[in-house]
Image (cartoon, rainbow, N blue to C red):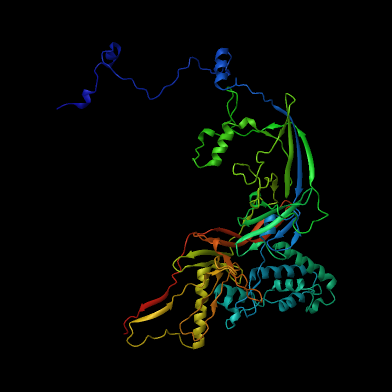
Amino acid sequence: MIDVASSFRTPDLAAVVLGKSKAGITLWNRLEGRPRTEAFDRALRAEVRDPLWFLTRQWQMGEFRGDDAGSPISVKVRLETTKLQKYQAASGPVEPYSDAIPLEAHAERMPLRFSQRARPDAEPHRIALDIRLLMGRQWLKMIRGVAPPAAAQEFLARYPVHEPDPTDPLDTPTCAHADAWSNFAAVAGRRMDGALLYFHLVDGAANHASDGIASLAGMDALIDPIAARFVAWFERLVYQPEGTGAWESDRLEYRFATSAPEAEGEKVLVAEQYFQGHLDWYNFDVDPQSGTLGEPDPQAEPPVRTTLTMLPTQATFNGMPNTRWWRFEDSRTNFGDIKPDTTDLAKLLLIEFGLVYANDWFVVPFTVPAAGIASVRGIAVTNVFNERTWITAAGAGDDEDRQRWAMFLLSTRGDARTPADLSLVIPPAAQKVLEGDPLEEVLLARDEMANMVWGIERTVPMPSGEPKDGREAAYQTRDFYERELERVLGVPPQPVAPAEGAKIRYKVMSSVPENWIPMIPVHKDGDNREVQLQRAVMLRIMEGDTNPTPEPVRPRTSLLREGLEGAQQVGYRLHEEEVPRAGVRVTQSFQRTRWSDGRAWVWLGVRKQTGRGEGSSGLTFDQIVDIPPQS
């Protein structure tokens, strides 16, 4: 038996090492220096002991390479600034614009809807109960202490909250949902509908809050100023458009234009595809074809020209590499720890700027006002040799030149060979916008099996003002109609019995949930090649219903009800390219921000995001269904 462990053991190891009688391989897994002293102060001073070593280090770092450039000591900059003064929605009129309003609130604002039509030929029913109650409470609080105590009850009687009637077809959208029905029933006859008073006041200048209120007879001088404050309070509460908004329903985007005066004409900026929720310089394009936005304004503020003379300051940042070898960089930024991918161009450019060109940049500060457009007309730099150099913009040249590269510059609309626009736009945009939960959510998805697009209402607004899951609301609505049909018939509806001895039956079409709104492809008017998506309807077919013309299922979100609220019904069409294969998710919610003057702005806005892919409705046609054996 062989002892393996003893075969690797060397007896009298000390004598073998001293005599070097056996060959061996020395291994180190750690090397440490052995200092001769305990203090390193003198070693860290980098004292000049060997001039030749310093000269070689300078040669290695390229400090002997000749460079005739001198350090800048003076710079003159000619600047021209102008402010945005006009605004125009997608197809609306030109209106003056002030930077007292955030540009997002001005462009995104959507109207609040207080009513909705159940059918095209019916009167609209009341919705947005939460806002109606809020307005009623505010009005009664404002007149408290001024009006007689009996005035409150008179306002409750004149502007009551509507009590839904389950037997009235107009109240079906409310009565079909127990929570919405209970909210209306709880406040009917007990609370005031403030929206009715607001509509009465803004309907005409001759209308007064005291109309129909006996206890306020002869008190118009006291009540009218309060009514004016009430109207102003609501209009400050939620910012709403006075006319045509910037939302384009056929593109699912906002489109608007703004302009600022120049020495000759105006600079017109166009935002054609805005849906992100935050405005910045990249949302705008320069429109050289539009000389002015609307009629020229002779009272417009002209551009302000400024000449700056100052000492240029070198641009510095944390972790900036030092050009002197005996100085250490700030450790707060470790460029050696950055691991970019080969396709991460922005990170690669940042590293190259920080490591190669960090000490070649100088800063000439200038504050550009908000809602302003700044243009640098010229820069002259004087160096230590009293040489003056005229600096041209790095992004100058043809706007269509593919090799032109610049940052924070606008593109020029069109494909004409025009010079690049070198101005810097500072839009009056909010720094932070708080977004509420979606009141409406629509998912536009492609269904390849049915060869169509569906507008799936995933979140719908209830008449009480609260959002509800679209599928749940659809099931509750259909269940309400089936119960109403059973009440009318007196017996539960029965399906049509099959023929005697039949083993199969023919099914023309299957059904889909009522929150799936079909969008069918149609040809664009006057064009036999371009295709658009047109809103269609599914019929509400129920077992036992003897109505020869079933009622169509209409959308419940304002995003898909385009054209249904007016007296004249208008079809809704959507450009086919706006719904890619991944689909589109569109939401509507309240937005809130605080502006520079401290005022809080609230508005109703829309967002568009990428969907989650294709969908399948399960819609089928011309099916043969087996009939189970009859008992």
- Could you tell me which residue is drawn at 66 percent across and 71 percent down? 114
Pick whichever, 199 or 526, lies toward us: 526
The quarter of the image holding the C terminus is: bottom left
Pick whichever, 346 or 129, lies toward us: 346
Q: As drawn, is 505 to the left or to the right of 377?
A: left
Q: Image height check: is 315 above or below 6? A: below
- Could you tell me which residue is drawn at 54 percent across and 73 percent down? 536
Q: Image height check: is 347 above or below 140? A: above
Q: Is residue 573 visible?
A: yes
- The percent position of residue 252, horizontal first and vertical second, equals 60, 62
Q: Image height check: is 486 above or below 313? A: below
- The percent position of residue 403, horizontal first and vertical second, equals 59, 41
Q: Quadrant of residue 494?
A: bottom left
Pick whichever, 50 or 493, lies toward us: 50
The quarter of the image holding the N terminus is: top left
Q: As drawn, is 245 to the left or to the right of 494?
A: right
Q: Image height check: is 297 above or below 121? A: above
Q: As drawn, is 589 to the left or to the right of 595?
A: left
Q: Quadrant of residue 230?
A: bottom right
Tally of numbered discs: 0
Q: Is residue 144 visible?
A: no
Q: Residue furthest top?
A: 19
- Could you tell me which residue is drawn at 41 percent across and 85 percent down? 496
- The percent position of residue 568, horizontal first and vertical second, equals 65, 76
- The percent position of residue 115, horizontal first and vertical second, equals 65, 73
